Amino acid sequence: MSNVNRRYKDTLFKHIFKETGPFLDLYETCSGKRLNADEIECFDLDSDVVQRDRYNDASFITKDNRLIYMVEHMSSKSENLAVKFGAYYFDLLRLWAVRENVNIHEYMDAHFPKPEMYVVYNGKKPYGKDCETFESGDFLRISVPIIDVRYAGLADKSAGNYLAGYSYLQREYERKLRAGMAPLEAFEYAVSQCRKKGYLKGIVEKEGFITMFSDVFSYDSQLRAEGKAEGKAEGMAEGMTEGMAKRDLEIAIKMLSNPKNGATRDEVIQTLSDLGISDETIEAALKQLQDAGRTQ
C-alpha cells in the first residue's frame, strides 16, 4: 500500500497545513513558539515551480520579510532532507526577490529572509534521529530538526489542535488498513471518527472532502489491478509503468472534462498535481480534450 499511503498523506498534509490556523498549531509543536496569524502569510512554490519534487509541503514568510518557515512531512527516513531544504530555500529566495523587486546583483545588502526549517515525521517506526544535517566543508551547513508527530506521543490531543486531528486521522486509517479494510473505506471510517471526536473542524465537514481523496484511492486500486495484469504478460516492472501512464492520463481526462463541485480548471490541475500526476500527462489530457472539442 505504499503508493496510496504516500499520495493520500502528501495530499492530506498540504490540504490542512497550507491554511494559516492549522499551520500555527504545527509551528508551535515544532518550535515551542506561538506565532500570531497577522505576522505571517503563505509563501510556497506550488504555482511557480514545474517539477513536483521542487517544492515543499508548507511554507510561510513573516510579513516583515524577516524569516521563511518551511515544514516538510515525511513518513519514511530520507538522508537527503537537508539538501532538499537547501534547494527549497534558494528557490523561495528567488521568488521573494522577484516579488519584492530585489536585484541580487546590486552591491547593497538586500536583507534576505532567513530560513527556519522543520521535518514532521509520522511513520510507522521511530525515525531514529532528531535531525538531518548536510555539510560541505566551511561553505555550507544545513541542519533540519525531525519532529515526531505520531498521535500516541503528542502532548496536546485537544479537539481544537489541527495537528492532533491530522495524526489521529492517519492513525485510524492505518489501523483499518492493517485489519484488511479497503483504502477508501478505511479513510471514510477515519474521517467519521474525527468528526465524532471534534477533530479537524471546518475541514472534514466540507462537502467534497472525501470525494477529493476518493480519486486518490480509486486511482491506486485501478493502477494495481492493471499493473498486475500487464505485468504477467510483459514483466511486472514494465506493466506497472505502462499501467501508471495509462491510468494517469485517463484520470486526468475524466477530472478535467467533468470537474466536481464547481471546481475551476486550475483547481482541477492542482488536484491532479497533488495526486502525483505529471505535468506532461496533464498537458496531454488537455490537448486531447482540446482536439476532441475541435472535431465535434
Image (spheres, rainbow, N blue to C red):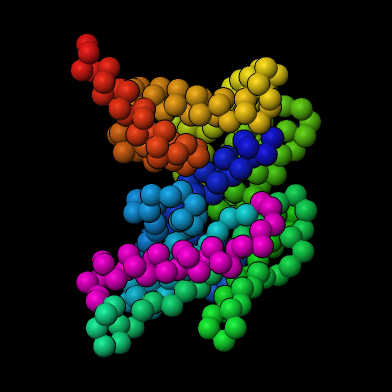
Left of 191 or right of it: where is 204?
left
Q: Quadrant of the C terminus?
A: top left
What is the span of residues highlighted in magenta in the rendered image? 75-103
Q: Quadrant of the N terminus?
A: top right
Q: Is residue 239 above or below residue 81?
A: above
Left of 170 or right of it: where is 203?
left
Secondary structure mostly seen in magenta is helix
Query: Does the magenta portion include 249?
Result: no
Snapshot quadrant of residue 278: top left
Is residue 224 among the parts visible in the rendering? yes
Left of 174 or right of it: where is 262?
left
Query: Which residue occupies the extreme front position in the image?
Result: 234
Instruction: Tell me which residue sits at (74%, 60%) in the image.
Output: 127
Instruction: Tell me which residue sits at (73%, 33%) in the image.
Output: 177
Query: Does the magenta portion include 93?
Result: yes
Nearest the viewer among 248 and 197 is 248
Q: Is residue 136 above or below residue 160?
A: below
Q: Position of residue 220 (x, y in %)?
A: 59, 29
Q: Position of residue 136 (x, y in %)?
A: 58, 78
Q: Position of residue 211 (x, y in %)?
A: 49, 29
Q: Is residue 253 above or below residue 144?
A: above
Snapshot quadrant of residue 238: top right
Q: How many marks?
A: 0
Is residue 32 among the parts visible in the rendering? no
Nearest the viewer among 165 and 90 is 90
